Image (tube, rainbow, N blue to C red):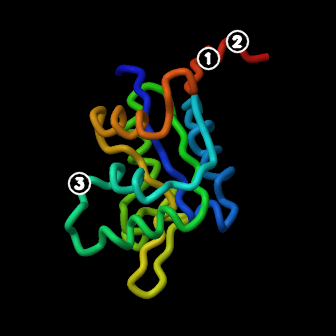
Amino acid sequence: MAVERTLIILKPDAVLRGTMGEVITRFERKGYRLVGAKLLRITPEIADKHYAEHIGKPFFGSLVAFIGMSPVLVAVIEGEDAIAVTRKLAGATNPLKAEPGTIRGDFGFTKGSDIYNTIHASDSLESAAREIALYFSPDELCSYDEEAHL
């Protein structure tokens, strides 16, 4: 398996409910490295680029509005088979269908017809590369060797 980098976004519900640390801990306990992270507010222009494949769909406007309603934590996770493992840790998109023990199963919720699923995770190498470039310049990402830890 190859070492990959993938993007995650801890969405406004994770930030506002104070679950960011618990989510990041799940990746670290699984042996993945956080190689870049920043708290920021996603502008409508960046949201349009991020969610470009959904432009024209009925839910597009609510996606853009929600992701920009508060700061989010964007982060790059690195490790072997990071994309597939991150998607598995995240769980099903709909938190009502997500298995207990997954991030969305444990932290996601619905309120009426609104879905709050806590995390975005890139779904392919191509998406990860495109999404990482939206939020990070190459010099903002740091590689490090776990053997160098004290």
| Placement of 62 over or under 75, stated as above or below | below
| Placement of 87 over or under 119, stated as above or below | above
| Placement of 113 over or under 87, stated as above or below | below
- Marks 3 and 1, how far apart at CA: 33 Å
- Marks 2 and 1, how far apart at CA: 8 Å
Residue 51 is situated, as x and y percent measured from the top left of the image, at 32, 55
Are the residues flagged by discs 2 and 1 in contact, CB closer than 8 Å? yes
Q: Secondary structure at mark 3?
A: helix
Are the residues flagged by discs 3 and 2 in contact, CB closer than 8 Å? no
Q: Which residue is mark 1?
A: 144
Crowd tier of the residue under label 2, counting other residues whose Cα lies within 10 Å: few below 14, some 14–19, many 20 or above: few
Q: Could you tell me which quadrant the C terminus lies in? A: top right
Q: Which residue is mark 2?
A: 148
Residue furthest right as drawn: 150
Q: Which residue is mark 3?
A: 53
Residue 127 is situated, as x and y percent measured from the top left of the image, at 31, 39
Q: Residue at x 27, y 53 (%)?
A: 52
| Placement of 68 over or under 20, stated as above or below | below
Mark 3 and mark 2 lie on one chain; the one further toward the N terminus is 3
Residue furthest front as drawn: 45
User: Identity of the amino acid at label 3?
Assistant: Glu
User: Identity of the amino acid at label 1?
Assistant: Tyr
Crowd tier of the residue under label 1, counting other residues whose Cα lies within 10 Å: few below 14, some 14–19, many 20 or above: few
Residue 131 is situated, as x and y percent measured from the top left of the image, at 38, 40
Crowd tier of the residue under label 3, counting other residues whose Cα lies within 10 Å: few below 14, some 14–19, many 20 or above: few
| Residue 101 in view (yes/no) | no
Residue furthest top as drawn: 148
Residue 24 is situated, as x and y percent measured from the top left of the image, at 61, 45
Q: Quadrant of residue 47?
A: bottom left
Mark 3 and mark 1 lie on one chain; the one further toward the N terminus is 3
